[in-house]
Amino acid sequence: MLMCRDLAGIASDYIDGELSFGQSVSVKMHLMMCKDCRSFIGNLRMSTRLMQGHSSAQADDEVIDRIRQRVSSALQERQPPSGPGQ
Amino acid sequence: MRTPTALDEQSLVDGLKRGDQSAYEQAVSEHTAGMLSVARFYVDPSTAEEIVQDCWVTVIDAIQRFESRSSLKTWLHRIVANRCKNRLRTSNREITTDFGEVLEPELDSRFKPSGRWSTPPKLRFEETADALMENGALSDCLDKHLGALPETQRSALILYEAHQHKSEDVCNILDVSASNLRVLLHRARQKIFLMVETFQETGEC
């Protein structure tokens, strides 16, 4: 029988649909009976949603600016020289 | 974040192939954060910046060979991963990754020997993730805790959640097995869960 601790160990796999059919049924049956695990799964799912769309907050603006400048310089170095009569 | 004038991927790739400055600005804005996440899986932040910079310069020439068989994002992430792996090989270093216990010790200690909760989750919120993120303090706290995650866990989480790569792609990019990726993701999520729980309960980060 699946215990709360077991469920906590496979909670991400459950959320991401990575469990086998049998495992998934065991988790669902446990969740029907255990409000604490329902709360854990709900909160873990919420935590994953907090991460979605959070990439921009993780970006280091100064680093990106430095990279943008380097790319801009590299592009300019590759531009063919333009001048009259060419 | 896409702007109304943002180019779609094919137009963006065409612009990159033409050496169009604005296309490069858009691509750097959209993809650098993800590339840094990949690099930080392997190397320290300063080396990661150096590698990502070099990769972008390489992309200026290599983009002509890009045939859109994968998304631009996946292609860029693979370039970064390969460059990092080469760097590690040259320096004879290995990635140190903890694929051991699945449960975080702080969470593990909240179960009785019988396997039932002794300290169950305290959160009972019904708020949506969007509503939670409108709380600036929680958003700052999330940034702080993401920054404190081991780089391997943080990279896996960001590539999978924030950059929405399929797990198969994350495994290929980071060169980890599917089961190891599951451990990295789960451990990172538990830490974020514990952070949100503490924040909701005490207001402290």
Image (spheres, coloured by chain):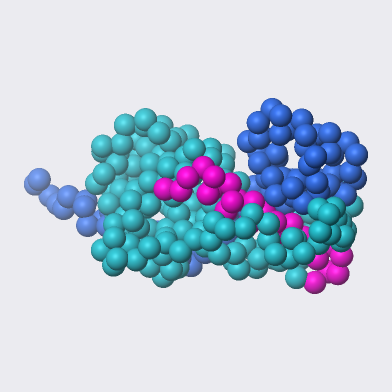
**From the viewer's perspective, is B107 left or right of B175?**
right
User: Can the viewer see residue B69 in this picture?
Assistant: yes
Who is closer to the viewer here, B135 or B83? B83
On screen, residue B119 versus residue B148, left or right, reads right
Q: Is residue B102 above or below residue B15?
A: below
Residue interval drawn in magenta: B175-204
Q: Is residue B11 above or below residue B135?
A: above
Q: Where residue B94 appears, x then y in whole percent?
A: 38, 63
Identify the residue at image location x=83%, y=54%.
Answer: B114
Q: Residue B197: where, in percent of width, then height? A: 81, 61
Residue A4, image x and y in percent?
A: 81, 48
Q: Does B121 sit above or below residue B19? A: below
In the rendered structure, does residue B180 fall within the stretch colored magenta?
A: yes
Q: Nearer the viewer, residue A36 or A55?
A: A36
Task: Identify the residue at the far left of this view.
Answer: A85
Chain identifier for the blue-coloured part of the image: A
- Residue B7 picture location, percent across and down: 47, 37
Tell me what residue is drawn at x 24 percent, y 46 percent. B61
Q: Is residue B72 magenta?
A: no
Looking at this view, is B188 or B49 the one in front? B188
Residue at the image point whose x is 29% and y is 66% from the top: B92
Residue sitting nearer the eye, B120 or A80? B120
Per the rendering, the colour in which chain B appears is cyan
Q: Which residue is rendered at x = 49% and y = 56% of the image?
A: B37
Q: Main secondary structure of the magenta part?
A: helix
Residue A49 in sight: no
Query: How many numbered discs sit on the rendered protein?
Result: 0
